[in-house]
Image (tube, rainbow, N blue to C red):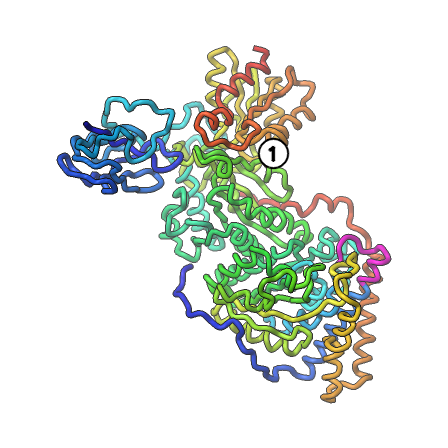
Amino acid sequence: MSVDVLMPALSPTMEEGTLAKWHVKVGDKVSSGDVIAEIETDKATMEVEAVDEGVVEAILVPEGAEGVKVNVPIARLTGEGAASPAPSAATPAPEVVAAPTPVAPTAAAAAPVPAPAVVLADPEIPADAKLIKTTVRDALRDAMAEEMRNDPTVFLMGEEVAQYQGAYKVSRDLLQEFGAKRVIDTPITEHGFAGLGVGAAMGGLKPIVEFMTFNFAMQAIDQIINSAAKTLYMSGGQIRCSIVFRGPNGAASRVAAQHSQDYSAWYANVPGLKVVAPYDAADAKGLLKAAIRDPNPVIFLEHEMMYGHEFEVPEGDHVLPIGKAKVRRVGVHVTLTAHSRMVGLALEAAEALAKDGIEAEVIDLRTLRPLDHETILTSVRKTNRLVSCEEGWGPMGVGAEVVARVVEHAFDYLDAPPLRVHQEDVPMPYAANLEALALPTVDKIVAAAKAVCYR
Amino acid sequence: MARAPKAAKTAATALSSSNSVSKEDLLNFYREMLLIRRFEERAGQLYGMGLIGGFCHLYIGQEAIAVGMQSVKQPGDQVITGYRDHGHMLACGMDPREVMAELTGRAAGASKGKGGSMHMFSTTADFYGGHGIVGAQVSLGTGLGLSNYYSDNGKVAFVYFGDGATNQGQVYESFNMAELWSLPVVYVIENNQYAMGTSVERASAETHLYKRGVSFNIPGAEVDGMDVVAVREAGLKAAEHARSGKGPFILEMKTYRYRGHSMSDPAKYRTREEVDAVRKTRDPIDHLQERLETSGWADEAALKAIDAEVKKIVADAAEFARTAPEPDPSELYTDVYLETAAQ
């Protein structure tokens, strides 16, 4: 009786990894708890322990293989201890059925997830700019590193940003380059360290405060709103607060209600804050550099599911203006607005709609406060139809604001009531099927777009 | 930012007294304390007349703390406090006119009339507010200490808060980081014995607030906050500790506020006798007056001259605040954002 050892998922969002090293060879006897292999992802290197006892019958994936999908069998054990048919190493995702015939992935497979193909030429990027494929994660890191090199008052603080190299590896190598005074590991005290950051900004520094996720920033929201956003006004323009609060926002994967929430609308409601939510790596870099240079407090909303995605980023000092939306796809029949990860879904929906003869214009909002409604209005005046897409809840949301502005300023251009696509009005469920039902999807966007086109 | 662990320090560090004050110092203290007292009395009066709106928290009774601590400040050291902030602003040297005009919501106010009693600032006086959320200034002030540490500028942040704030969680988050990173911060707890209507005994499991740093290895001392010289002596030691790179220090100032928590507080939670007893026996201004007279450093006529001078300043500030114009409506939309520099 033999049992397969499957490629384990090492984080909620891991889809594949590199089999860095085998610690066993064919014929070796293993016991439960023995380290049998090392797996590398873009975030971390982890050891894989045997769950079952037995003898290694076959190594199915060679050492050094990249892009090994989660749940692919990587080895086979035989022996009395290996009688259990239970999956080993890690609990597989439930939607995955029986593992296919083991095929070693080619070592050439790229680890980063390829981006959707439809990307318009960006007028902000010079035609002769050299483009370099970069993940969103590395683009963010490059932005911080470049600004820290340029300005000695810029520093990074947060949980696990230094020695651990970032919980999501966004701050990788920054400690090595800039030292412990400028890359500061904080205790797990969001309220306190956000307050320290704001105070340091009032004292003339330019802190980047990383929240491991924006879910934890709720502990600190008093300091963000009451201290960071309002003090310039309350001081009659005297007290400056140049600070960036950044980290992943929105739905992760299978982490349930307290770790999966989109705060876009919360912060975008507050005067005194700027709120940025980029989609691709070029925008992530260009807008984070702008956010760090901005003399105002900036909420910079990243997305965990986008960190590993690769896009082209112009080489050099790529800085983008805050407050400008971007038309990502030109169309004439319906306008889709989206920000952050939802831009990718809107672009996919546009491709699907094109097959049915509906050409959607996709607008990446990029900045939520100040909202570039001129770009939205210009589009709606052309298409006469609007669907807003967001990952957060609908009521009082970003879509509600987009729709309100369109109704206020372009009512006569509308040929159909605008629709909003958003998360279902429930806390994020854990179960895979319920989570999928709760989240906005390409299909939901397609359906809404067809509805406003009366198709 | 890690550093070698230190041996635990005793919580109550003995503060021996020294004769660090001259006749001029004491006369200055008298004048400044009296200015705060008369200013606050007048603010109370203007509130009663409807010229000051909203919340207005008076500092009467606590004057020795702001004045004594101000005397140990060096140029560039920062001050930050909560909403009972008028006394601190005057002690920092802000113009009584701009403070009073802010109370009446006028364009000439310290915050152009947009902050009010609880939210005033002065970058020229190194006064960082004026914060309305109980305890928030402790994290912010620790952040000012972080900026001093980062810039290695030799400055100290003086962070004031009340006994009520000592039960806020972020105060301890800040204590932890301040000691962990040896930040130059002096925490000044103004224990006036009532957090609004709740006495320290009814709100605090440990009523000796100078011990609140024990589990972070932050030394602390209890100080008679009604004695301006004792405040100064303690402040000198605490500031020296912080400035020399040894990290934060906690001073618990035992004090008392004579008025209600704010103007709208009838103060039914304590007796008239209790208030009167403090006024009669512990008043910081009376105490200093006696000291000046018995030491022969000032006679009644000299002190009366100071009284007259202070009264004139306060009357002028009140008249200015009463007659100065309100902010222009266009000010509604200014100071929300700073312009972004061309990139």
Residue where numbered disc 1 is placed = A371
**Up/down of A165 relative to B161, above or below:** above
Give how far across and how far down residue B138 sits, in percent: 58, 59
**Up/down of B254 relative to A163, above or below:** below
Q: Residue at x 41, y 35 (%)?
A: A313
Q: Quadrant of residue B2?
A: bottom left
Q: Is residue A338 left or right of residue A166?
A: right
Q: Residue at x 36, y 48 (%)?
A: A173
Which one is nearer the viewer's eye here, B55 or A345? B55
> Magenta part of the protein: which range?
B43-56
Verify whether residue B4 appears in magenta.
no
Give how far across and how far down residue A437 sits, in percent: 49, 24
Instruction: Kindly state the secondary structure of the residue where label 1 is placed.
Output: loop
Give how far across and how far down residue A191 sits, in percent: 54, 51
- The answer to whether any part of residue A125 appears in the image is yes
The local crowd at label 1, few if under 14, some if 14 to 19, many if 20 or more residues have their Cα within 10 Å, is: many
Q: In this figure, what is the number of numbered marks?
A: 1
For badge 1, the amino acid type reads Leu
Q: Residue at x 54, y 69 (%)?
A: B249
Quadrant for the N terminus of chain B in the image: bottom left
Q: Quadrant of residue B158?
A: bottom right
Q: Is residue A321 left or right of residue B280?
A: left
Which one is nearer the viewer's eye here, B238 or B134? B134
Q: Residue furthest left?
A: A27
